[in-house]
Each structure stands twice: as C-alpha cells, then as structure tokens.
Amino acid sequence: MSVRALPGPLAAALVAALLLASGCTTTTTGTPAVSERTVDDKEASKANVSLGMAYMQQGNLPLAKEKLDRAEKQDPRNYQVHWAQATLNERLRQPAEADRHYQTALKLAPQNGEVTNSYAVFLCSSGKVEPALKLFDSAVNNPLYSTPWAAATNAAVCLRSDKRDGDAVPYLEKAILRRPDYASAVVELADTQLALNKPDAARATVDRFMSIGRKSPDVYLVGVRAALKQGDRVTADTYARLLRRDFPNSPQASELQQLMQPAGAATSAAPATPAAPAPRR
C-alpha cells in the first residue's frame, strides 16, 4: 500500500506504526533493553490506536480492530486503547464489550472528562439514564474538562429522550452560562421551551444568542418557530430573511417554505387525491 495515497492523518499514523512495529529496541549487542522496550511498546500502542481510529473513520472496521487489538497487547494500561475499543464495539453492535472497555478506560483515566462524557452518552443510548446522568454531572463539574458545556447539553438531550423536558432545562441553561455562543445548547433549549409551550422563553433564548453577534441556521430556524407560535409574523419574517441571507443554501433555509405557509395553505394548494379504484372481483 502506498502511504502517499492515504489521507494525511492516516499516512502519518501508518508511518509511525511501521517505525514502531517491533515494539522493542535492542542494545548494540542485540539484547533487548527492558526499559527501552517498555517505552517502545507504549509508543507503538499509541501509533496503533491512531491507525485504528483512522481506519474506523474510513469504515474499515476489520482493520481497525486488528490495529486496536495489537495496541491493547502492547500497552493494556493505555486508556486511549480502551476508549477506542469501546467506540469500535459500539460500531460493531457489541454493547457488552463496549461497556467493558468504557469501564476500563474510566478506571485508568478517572479525571478524563472526554471519556466520562463519551461513556455517559453510551449509557444513555443504552437506556441507562440515571447512571448516565451521574457521569454527565461528573464531567460538567470536572475543572480539568475543557468543554463542560458539551456534557451539560448531552445530559439535557439524554433527559429529553426520557421525556423529561422540564429536567433538561437547567442543564441547557448551565451550558449556555458556561458558553453563551454554543449554538447546540441554544437550539436545544429553545426547542425544549417550545415543547413546554413557552414560546416567549424560546424567543428570549434566541434573541440572547443573536445579541452577542453570533449566527447559526438552526438558531434562526427555531427563532422562526418561536415567533410563529407567539403569533408574531413580522418577527418570524425577520428571522427567515436572516436565514436566507446568511445561509441561503442550507437545509434549514429549504425548510422555511413549508414552515412559513399560512395554516391550511398546503392543504388547499394540494391537488385532490383520486379515489382508489374498486378491487376487481
């Protein structure tokens, strides 16, 4: 296989893995040096994790598994190996193995907020909402985690999947407090407020985001929905104009035509459906 033909990250990972393929080094007499071999095994493991993740992104799961299994043998205490193995086993629809690797990764790196957040998302997708929420809370409150607003938003999405919209609101407010320009949390909060029949609150959420000079097609679209639910057609038209101007080719702009139609317009404009022919006897 030609390294040149591969994408940059994958090629770099492949070069590193090839250079470290033996997983050990020797002294000038040809005898393996234990301390050097340990270092090389760790570096080889890291390289194989990079390769495994790159192959996973390409959809080559068998080769990803081969690289990650080798990485685990080279350094079974590398938390990134188990995190990657968990991700792979999710893709392979082997939840028990994914859970085992997530637990191992978290045990090896208990202060890693990314692992904690990823495991929480996995647990929630498996229907284990309460254990997931405990991990989300841990990630949100972890001072070493660089994106706590992401974990807070994920916690809210998890709660909403459990039909607990009211409980999701504080998490989304916390996410926006940490990062006011985080569009995903803004959209989720406004959508939740609309689901709770609070269009005024949803409109305020959108306006706060826009007041800091940020633009997002999803925020504009939920703004249109909020204004329409308020009965404020003028403001809905304003949001729609901004969406068409700033994101003219977006899927969100394509949704506007149907969303902005007056009630009953689609029905009246649609041609009558012909009656089905009577079945032949």
Image (tube, rainbow, N blue to C red):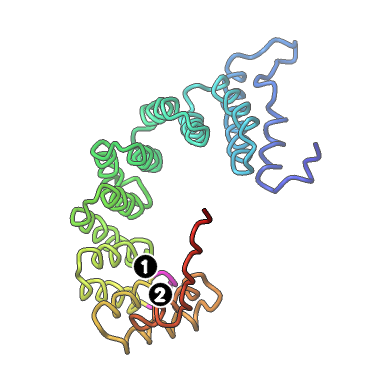
256, 105: nearer the viewer: 256
Residue under numbered circle 1:
181
Farthest residue toward the right? Answer: 2
Residue at left 64%, top 37%? 60
Q: Is the magenta region chiefly helix, strand or loop? A: loop
Residue under numbered circle 2:
214
- Which quadrant of the figure has residue 45? top right
Vertical relation: 189 (above or below) 201: above
Residue 276: percent from left, percent from top: 48, 64
Q: Which residues are magenta?
A: 213-218
Indicate the secondary structure of the residue bearing disc 1. Answer: loop
**Which sits earlier in the primary sequence, circle 2 or circle 1?**
1
Farthest residue toward the bottom? Answer: 234
Indicate the secondary structure of the residue bearing disc 2. Answer: loop
Vertical relation: 62 (above or below) 280: above
Q: Residues within 10 Å of mark 2 (few under 14, many from 20)?
A: few
Residue 120: percent from left, percent from top: 34, 40
252, 179: nearer the viewer: 252
- Residue 215 shown in magenta: yes
Number of marks: 2
Residue at left 58%, top 38%? 53
